[in-house]
Amino acid sequence: MMDKGQIIFIILMGWGVLIYGGLTFLVAKKKELSLINGFSNRSEEEQKYLIENGYVEALGKLLTYSFFLFLISYILGIFQVPYGLSVGLGLFLLVVLIGIVWINRYEVPAKRKKNYWITGSISLATLLFTGGVFGYGYVTTDITLDDQGIQIDGMYGEQLSWDEVHAAEVSDQPPTVTVKTNGFAMTNHLKGRFLVEEFDSTVTLFISGDQAPYIYLETEKGTIIFNRSSEHEAEAIYQAIMNHKDGET
């Protein structure tokens, strides 16, 4: 049985697939050139040149290839193939960004060089930014304990004093995510604020991989759930937390 998060993914992502597929069909098959950004504002001479030189056909191919990548990513996401969605969307983005630079070879000569620079700069900046965010999101969160409290470093990190930590539990069961409200979520890497079935309000997750156990912290800032790369490390952190809390009583 699918959970709420999977149902929401199917609906929203499916809507995106339909819209992108419809746009691809209208441009690549029906030649609805008015849908091409800025095409209607060009002179008749430029429009004729772009059509005869293969610009429209190249754009249609780019939309078609990228649509099938998008569709495959959607299908992989539905069946929850490990890393399928993130790899598929990464390839989709790569094809689109390279493609919008590549089709400038069919552009009007007077505008070709300028458009190469513009689209090339945008594509490079987007790739660097996206790659940085994805790379940072996949980095395992550092969690350290000292006499002052708990320090959670990295994306969506938290700093908690021991007074702010009310309770801690350990469980072999991961939280069941329904909706991401503000965070990073790719495959089994979850960081940030999420709605989960086990709680009525949003919780903060720092989960990398599917290594149990999971530590549930009740704090003044809300519920925080995290895991570690090994069972031994998680149990050591949990025991250290309990030792600090027992020392306060």
Image (tube, helix red, strand yellow):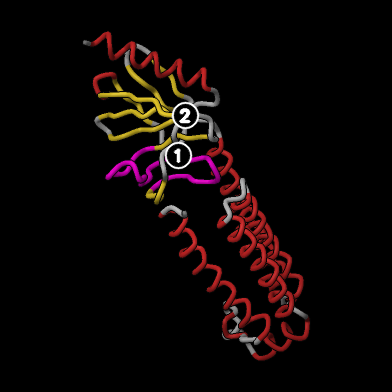
Disc 1 is placed on an element classified as strand
Could you classify mark 2 by the number of other residues whose Cα lies within 10 Å: few (under 14), some (14-19), or many (20 or more)? Answer: many
- Is residue 84 left or right of 137 when viewed as pictured? right
Identify the residue at the far left of this view. 249
Q: Could you say which is closer to the camera, residue 99 or residue 138? A: 138
Residue at 53 percent across and 46 percent down: it is 186
Which of discs 1 and 2 lies nearer the camera? The answer is 2
Which residue, given by chain and number where applicable, does mark 1 sit on? 191
Q: Is residue 6 above or below residue 144?
A: below
| Image position, residue 226 (x, y; %) | 43, 31
In the image, which residues are magenta?
182-204
**Residue at the image point whose x is 58% and y is 40% from the top:** 135
Measured as percent of width and height from the top left, residue 21 is found at 59, 74
Residue holding disc 2: 227
Q: Main secondary structure of the magenta part?
A: strand
Mark 1 neighbour class, 10 Å CA radius: few under 14, some 14 to 19, many 20 or more: many
Magenta-span inclusion, residue 184: yes
Q: Amino acid at mark 2?
A: Asn
The amino acid beneath tag 1 is Lys
Image height of 178 relative to 115, above or below: above
